[in-house]
Amino acid sequence: MSRLMRVGLVGFGAVARVHCAAYKSLSAVEVVGVTDKDPKQIDEAKNKFGLPVFPTLEEMLRVASLDIACVLTPAATHEKVVGICAAARVNVLCEKPLAVSVEACERMIAACRVAGVRLCYGASYRYLPALVVAREMIRNGELGRVLIIREYAVGGCGVDRRATLSDAHYPKGGPGGSGMGLVDHGIHLIDAFGWLLDSPVIGAQGRGNITGQPQGPEFAHLEYANGAVGQLLYEDGTYPTDLPQEGTFGWAGGWSVGENTVDIRPGAWQSHPGCIHVHGTHGSLRIFHYANIMLLRDKHGICQVRLPDQAFPSNFGLQLMAFANAIQSGGDTPVPGEVGLDACRTLLQIYASRNPPKIEQKDGASRYIRDLIK
Ligand SMILES: NC(=O)c1ccc[n+]([C@@H]2O[C@H](COP(=O)([O-])OP(=O)(O)OC[C@H]3O[C@@H](n4cnc5c(N)ncnc54)[C@H](O)[C@@H]3O)[C@@H](O)[C@H]2O)c1
């Protein structure tokens, strides 16, 4: 890279710390500014992490000469924050979900286009080495024709410990629920499944939680143009059924649901590691995407697939570098905002397939869901 890229972080909560951990090892980028609307977080960025801080976003944009602003604030704020960055002519990397209405996503894309800046969607799963290798294997035909791709995240510590996100993240009446539910976590898979399969989604149905309403299990049934079927099943208000010995030692660290921080050490035993299953006509994959371990089963038996040692949280660094390289070289934005728009549209289609009649009887929130899809 010909010159150091100057990066600013907007929002210094849980995910910002992960971005920082990943960016530390990058020699081509420098975090030259952090801002947050909460002064306590600004203090932490300055005193614990030794980062340059700014009291407001506007001040950071005016003073810090940013090449990229990383928008790491709750989904409900993304449209406003991205709009301010675009108006200041700064390229944006925006965390998932891009927004929780199709119209908001479209306005964000338009604001960046009009300002002549790039909008990159934070699809961090696309940079997890296990998923990169799985995608190559699928494209090379090593699994034959993929029939089913699925992720079930069912567990937790009972209903009282359900990690429901506040309406600061997901406003009342719209998609919401747990940090391991459809809108906040499943949005990764809604994007990653189609990307892994290299096939667009042609049908989406299911059920998702609404902020302010009683929460329950969520599911999605996805159909792809190539005939594959995708399934998501989420609930963290119960207990896992895996036996202790069914976990794995992780090559990489990971998230701990509830704490929402990187507190699983690389090499530690993970009893319920995040796991994606891909079933093809000639082979199947069990992908522990955060633990950075992948198992192939085919007619020869079962084997462990070698993966690059660039596991979590390096995927956030790889994501930023891909964007920075594209800006410097004039190449295409690696994962443009339109990808986030597509994921949002599919998510809302899942909601609309089941939720409107149910919600309409209660408080009219179904009209809100329908409006979000238009
Ligand atoms: N890629 C991933 O794997 C991943 C993981 C976790 C979270 N996320 C995404 O990252 C984003 C942030 O999530 P989080 O868990 O860090 O949330 P968080 O609540 O821990 O942190 C958000 C921070 O943003 C600040 N903030 C809110 N509004 C702001 C504004 N207008 N201007 C400046 N600061 C503002 C808050 O004070 C808070 O410190 C969300 O979009 C979430 O979905 C992505």
Image (spheres, rainbow, N blue to C red):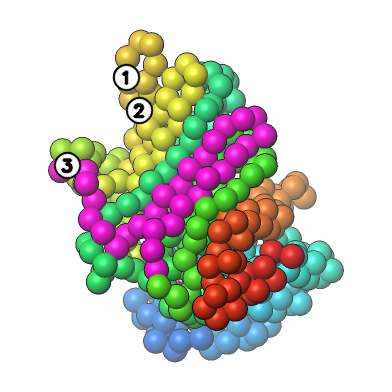
Q: Which structural element holds mark 3?
A: loop
> Exactly how many numbered labels are in the figure?
3
Q: Amino acid at mark 2?
A: Leu
Residue shown at 32% from the left, 20% from the top: 303
Residue shown at 39% from the left, 87% from the top: 40
Whole-percent x, y for residue 255 in the image: 34, 57
Whether disc 2's CB lies below 8 Å from ligand 1 is answered: no
Q: Which residues are magenta?
A: 215-244
Q: Amino acid at mark 1?
A: Ile
Q: Toward the viewer: 357 or 238? A: 357
Marks 2 & 3, CB-CB < 8 Å contact: no
- In three-dimensional space, the C-alpha distance between marks 1 and 3, rounded to whole angstroms, equals 20 Å
Q: Is residue 2 visible?
A: no
Residue 14 vertical position relative to residue 135 in the rendered view, above or below:
below
Q: Is residue 86 visible?
A: yes
Instruction: Tell me which label, 1 or 2, sits earlier in the chain.
Output: 2
Q: Amino acid at mark 3?
A: Leu
Residue 365 vertical position relative to residue 68 in the rendered view, above or below:
below
Marks 1 & 2, CB-CB < 8 Å contact: yes
Residue shown at 46% from the left, 86% from the top: 38
Whole-percent x, y for residue 96 in the image: 55, 61
Q: Toward the viewer: 144 or 304? A: 144
Residue 371: numbered disc: none
Residue under label 3, please give it: 243
Name the outermost residue toward the right: 114
- In three-dimensional space, the C-alpha distance between marks 2 and 3, rounded to whole angstroms, equals 19 Å
Residue under label 1, please give it: 302
User: Callout 1: few (<14), some (14-19), or many (20+) C-alpha neighbours within 10 Å?
Assistant: few
- In three-dimensional space, the C-alpha distance between marks 1 and 2, rounded to whole angstroms, equals 7 Å
Whether disc 1's CB lies below 8 Å from ligand 1 is answered: no
Residue under label 2, please give it: 295
